[in-house]
Image: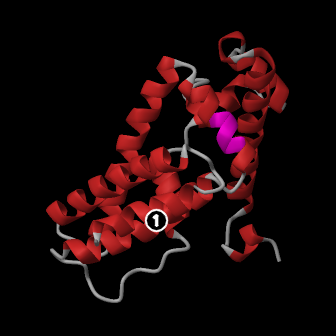
Amino acid sequence: MAEEQIRGDSLTDRKRRRAKEAIRRAALDLFRERGFDAVSVTDIAQRAEVGRTTFFRYFGDKQEVLFSDPADAAAEASQRVSAPTDLIGSSIAAALAAARRLVVGYVEDITADPVAYKRHQELVTSHPELYARSLVKQRGYADELAGHLQSWGATPSTARQAAEIGLACFYAGQAAAKDDPRVLARHVDLAFDRLCR
């Protein structure tokens, strides 16, 4: 049985996901072929075989194609992470343990296709406007992580602190791994390890 059927996705959900993925693939292929600045929304829609209206149903602009919605990314990563058996409360240790599982899971998701990850990162780092957009999105991921920790019973201040530390561990792991997708998750995990020494 297909994974999407196991998760109970409706036909509409599957169609939406396929349309979004077709648009993403088309955009990345075009950006690689022509360069980011030489590609229009119309070009992407034509390559993906969708209308411009469909493009704008899922993405606000061509930059947005490169970035996941923070809520979607957090939800995908959290699907594989079980909730703590006890409420987190004000325990920073418990909040960091939960954040670690969520952040490492997220990194495993985004690096599952190492070639796509490297292409994405090269594109983002070579365009200042995309890099700025990436930093804004990462703030969104921290907000989603804090919200998720609160849903597991963390106090707001504990959730926020753990989320910010989680984001710092992501950055530290990127630097240590030299952003190599094959070892990035391991280095992010090691960054969390260093907190406990």
Which residue is pictured at 45% across the width and 70% down the height?
A: 101
What residue span does the magenta drawing correspond to?
A: 116-120
Judged by its main secondary structure, the magenta piece is: helix
Which residue is pictured at 69% across the width and 35% down the height?
A: 119
Instruction: Tell me the quadrant of the picture where the C terminus can be found.
Output: bottom left
> Camera-side residue: 97 or 66?
97
Query: 8 left or right of 51?
Result: left
Categorize mark 1 by other alpha carbons within 10 Å: few (<14), some (14-19), many (20+). many
**The quadrant where residue 116 appears:** top right
Query: 70 left or right of 183?
Result: left
Instruction: State the image coordinates of residue 58 (x, y, percent, origin top left).
Output: 61, 37
Look at the image and tell me whether residue 184 can be seen: yes
Which residue is pictured at 29% across the width and 56% down the height?
A: 165
User: Is 9 located above or below residue 19 in the figure?
Assistant: below
Instruction: State the image coordinates of residue 179 (x, y, percent, origin top left).
Output: 56, 44
Instruction: Tell me the quadrant of the picture where the N terminus can be found.
Output: bottom right
Which residue is pictured at 37% across the width and 65% down the height?
A: 192
